[in-house]
Amino acid sequence: MNYVQIVLITVISTFLASSIAYLFRHFLIVRIGHSLIEKFVAHLPQARNISGKWEAQFRKGEECYTETAQVSQLLGKVWGTIRLDKAPMRRYRIAGNIREGVLVASYEIKEPKEILDCGSFTLRLSPDGQSMYGCGSWTDDETTVPQGHEYTWTKPLYRGIDGLRIKKSPIHGKGVFANKQYSPQAKVADFDGYEVERGTRHSLTLEGRVIEGTGPLRFLNHSCNPNCYFERRTLVTNTAVGQGEELTINYLECETAGRPKHPFKCKCKCSNCLHKIG
């Protein structure tokens, strides 16, 4: 082995070693370590961990607005995003601290960037950990003087959620599975969401309105031989559904004029599968 080969092997070995060290440090220590610490802190005595999804509500003048907050917490630090459930939709970044059950945070507009909208809020966590209440203040493109109103967060409660389970689907991505047995014509749950002007890949057209789903039924997959359908905004079974079976609908029945705006390949594997929808 000559000198050039020795140098080349040394350089390659050094590069591989540094790459492995980088991956170990960032993927194992940072990501997995963060998750483990977060779970550990959540189970400490008297710990108040608010990580997860919250539904928020506040009043601006005579109007009442709803939001969906997705937050993470590590020790006393809190961060995440808030989505205003109204068209046109707005998204916000939040950052703050929670101490002794009191969350103090600020927010700023994330999308659309050209709009002025920022502020802060203070919320106290209820003893059962299922809600927070307090006040918020903000300045936006419609208000030149900061405004403050009552502001509350609550854990989302979906009707029928006890009978449903969200997990990986053989059809596509995540799916909705029965957590118990359903008889034919059984009412499963309501489709929760907010109205939007244009359809998306996850919206359904129900009662003549385009609804962007926020509840568990947003994970419903299409089947050319579905076992459920919508009666107004309530999911109803059209056959008996066993525990562990995936609940499906016919997307063509939930689109304007039966023509989906986002065509896709069907993977339901039914004998009468159309293979391509739209």
Image (tube, helix red, strand yellow):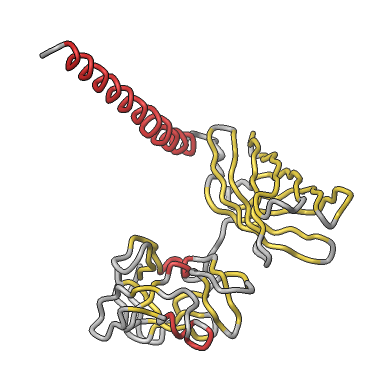
The residue closer to the viewer here, 25 or 134, is 25
State whether residue 185 is above or below residue 103.
below
**Where's residue 250, x and y in %?**
40, 82
Query: Going 47% across and 37% down the picture, which residue do you hit?
Result: 38
Q: Does residue 87 lie above or below 104 as drawn?
A: below
Q: Position of residue 55 (x, y in %)?
A: 61, 58
Q: Is residue 159 left or right of residue 275?
A: right
Q: Please, is residue 247 above or below residue 65 in the view?
A: below
Q: Quadrant of residue 274?
A: bottom left
Snapshot quadrant of residue 268: bottom left
Outermost residue toward the top in this view = 3
**Residue pictured at 70% horizontal, 39% vertical:** 104
The structure residue drawn at horizontal position 85% and vertical position 48%, both measured from the top left corner, is 146
Coordinates of residue 3 in the picture (x, y in percent): 17, 11
- Number of marks present in the image shown: 0
Q: Is residue 65 left or right of residue 54?
A: right
Q: Quadrant of the C terminus?
A: bottom left
The residue shown at (83%, 50%) is 148
Question: Where does residue 17 sit, x and y in percent of width and height?
Answer: 28, 22
Residue 176 vs residue 149: left or right? left
Q: Which of these two is toward me, 150 or 273?
A: 273
| Location of the N terminus (image quadrant) | top left
Task: Using the image as rendered, state which of residue 238 and residue 180 is in the foreground.
Answer: 238
Question: Could you tell whether 1 is left or right of 44 in the image?
Answer: left
